[in-house]
Amino acid sequence: MWAPHLVVIVRCAPDEPGVGALEVAYFRGEERIARNVQPLQVEPGKFNYRLVRAELEFTDYGTVEARARIDAGPVTVVPYTLLPPPGSRAAATGHRLLPLRVLGNSYGGPRVRGVPTVGGPVTSIEKLGINVIKALAMDAPHAARSGHQGTAMALAPLAHVLWTRIMRYDAQRPDWPDRDRFVLSAGHASILQYAMLYLTGHGLTLEDLRNFRQWGSPTPGHPEVGCTPGVEVTTGPLGQGIANAVGMAIAESQMRSRYGADVCDHRIFVIAGDGDLSEGVSHEAASLAGHLGLGRLVVVYDDNEVTIDGGTDLALSDDAAARFRAYGWHVIELGEAAEDLDGLEAGLRDAAAVEDRPTLLIVRSVIAAPAPAASGTPAAHGYAIFDDEIAATKDLMGLPAEETFHVPPEVLDYYRRAGTAGQDERFAWEARTAAFDGDRSGLEACLASTGRAGWDGSLPSWEPGQSVATRKASNVTLQALLPVVPGLTGGGADLTGNTGTVIADGGVFSARGPGGRQIYFGVREHAMGAIANGMALHGGAIPVVGTFLVFADYMRPAVRLAALAEAKAVFVWPHDSVGVGEDGPTHQPVEHLASLRAIPGLRVIRPADATETVGAWRVALESAGPTALILTRQGVPVLEGTRTDAVAAGGYALREPDEPSLTLVGTGSEVSVCCDAAAILAAEGVAARVVSLPSWELFADQPYSEQARVLRPDLPSLAVEAGSTMGWSRWTDEALGIDRFGASAPGAVVMEKLGISASNVADRARALTAGAPSRAAL
């Protein structure tokens, strides 16, 4: 038997002292079984903590609730912890009780029932390690004067359990293909991930933590794949990480089904918060994950009931557990177990064992625990814990109060050993993979995100004069590539046939067909983009996803992250102009090309015809990072002189007459319009060059001498594109485009009415040559 000690932390209002009494009582049900009253005096603006001992010893404390009441002016109670007394048997064996919360200052006020429960034995090094993580989560943002401390502190025990007891990885080889994946969807808690990566030996240093959020540091404000060893995906915009993880689970399922568990046999773990589960992208992704029966996906929901604006009850009242059960997920509710290492481990192991559906593991935590004043407050979501409180919190945890970035050698040694615990499993995997006697060339191509040797020999070709919609040419190319690029997989957002993302003979990916390459995403454009990112970053898959160009806006946050993360995804966006026709302006993109070109790192290609479409696919597969294919709904002629290899340069001269007077520059379907306009002008004795400029990004990568050779700045130039003219001044003297919404009518009529016609281009060319200076003269 032992008498529980209750650490009660109190704080005064800034200007008034708190004088009165502190009463602590212990209840079993509504029966009070022990009570202690102490006088209380707290200085203005300060906080302190009191160790209060009950007058009764008991052993069945698992049924006991502690409550506190303050009678002391403006004093408030913040999170407290029930502890075994020093030197007791419970303390010696590592038993501990969970953090509790008081939400009101009287017995009758609102509160969360904190039922203390004792976990199994926990070593003293684990206790110390978790406290070191919490201290680092305070120190790094404090040094940066920026960051999010509270969630990282609250989830330090969870991270400890994941990295030391659950996940299979080798810190010496963070790119081991069969490692478990960790996704911090709550990316604002990045310091938690960085602390674990440093401690487990992934390559970060303590100095990197000191430089948290600083220029050039590998510890940016939110996790960025490629910047920090061990970071799997780029997160921060809430909800994206959950959808990324769904993509990873799809890729893992496909690889395991196709190449066997000896090659691919791992799990995906996610930490998400209230904000993640509020974002629409997480709803879309969770719904699809449940439908697809994605086992081996474990999302830990940190239900801390705190947002930046205040408590979650300001804007959130849905039942997350019921919602995810309705999606078809397995749901485990651990309750207030954020400090219960054995409870967390048991829950995670139960979740990881579920093979037929994803699992949501709900854990109630106290944000910023055990910080005396910040715990449980909305301010703790951000940077809210400063010098005095950091010192008091460290003192409360038994760490040197004034020392920053304190990592005892025994703690570092403990985590470094955990970081290499998976080496034997990696060695065994390497041996199995070396002995793999299945489709080795396919496996190697998948792991390298490329094609089999000689894959480009399967690319199709077309004869000039044929009329082919570039979306159809894209699908023909995709079908030709499927046998030789085994990682290609994907589909559309309920527009699979319309977007040319049909994967013939690849099988449908489903709970019953986990090896299928055709994925039906449903009307979930945002999740589709984020899932594609997860698939690409997982490895083993080259995702191809499509919808109409006008709906690319639904995908934009995911597309932006694809560019930032350099995820090798192919976004197929047909119906690329007002040529869509009868569907009208709601479905006719105008501003979209300019908007997509504004995203750094996104390779936008708008091919002129079927031949250039093949070249666009070649670029997409040979390059790192995401590619956007902007394709026509309507048929366009296969032009004389277009080349697949020229697409990689971004632009080239398609018509090069003697003694030209001007240059017409087009993209997509307007290249043929430029060719027709050039023919009209030629009949009048005016020689016009025609340049196809399928990709601004690729063209901008060329040296200026090559750009000048193609565009000829010594000649007047006119760009023609059925979309916004924004940005064209970078390349040409004038631009003929569409800077208004379209209209509902047959596509050819809309194009003609809005000036995208050979005759109107010829008119504008005549006016340009009549008096406009060339760019060289400006």
Image (cartoon, rainbow, N blue to C red):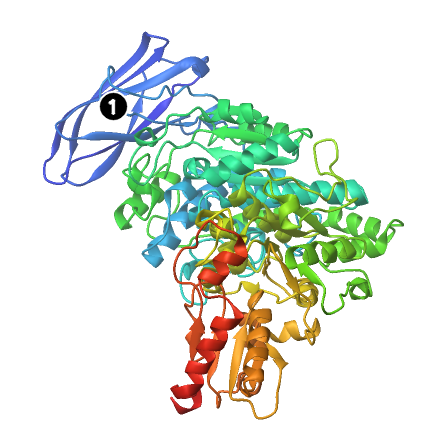
Return the x and y of residue 69 as percentages of the image width and height. 23, 20
Give whichever of 726, 721 is nearer the camera: 721
Name the residue that disc number 1 marks: 104
**Residue at the limit of the structure toward the front, as seen here:** 684
Q: Please give the name of the residue rendered at 34% of the width and 12% of the height, measured from the top-left corner.
A: 27
**x and y percent of residue 76 in the render?**
21, 30
Left or right: 747 as drawn, with respect to 483: left
Q: Quadrant of residue 360?
A: top right
Instruction: Give left or right: position of 502 versus 382.
Output: right
Relative to 563, does residue 41 appear above or below in the rendering?
above
Q: Give the residue furthest to the right.
A: 437
Quadrant for the N terminus in the image: top left
Quadrant of the image containing the C terminus: bottom left
Which one is nearer the viewer's eye here, 393 or 75?
A: 75
Counting from the top left corner in percent of width and height, residue 598 is at 45, 64
Q: Residue at x 57, y 44 (%)?
A: 528
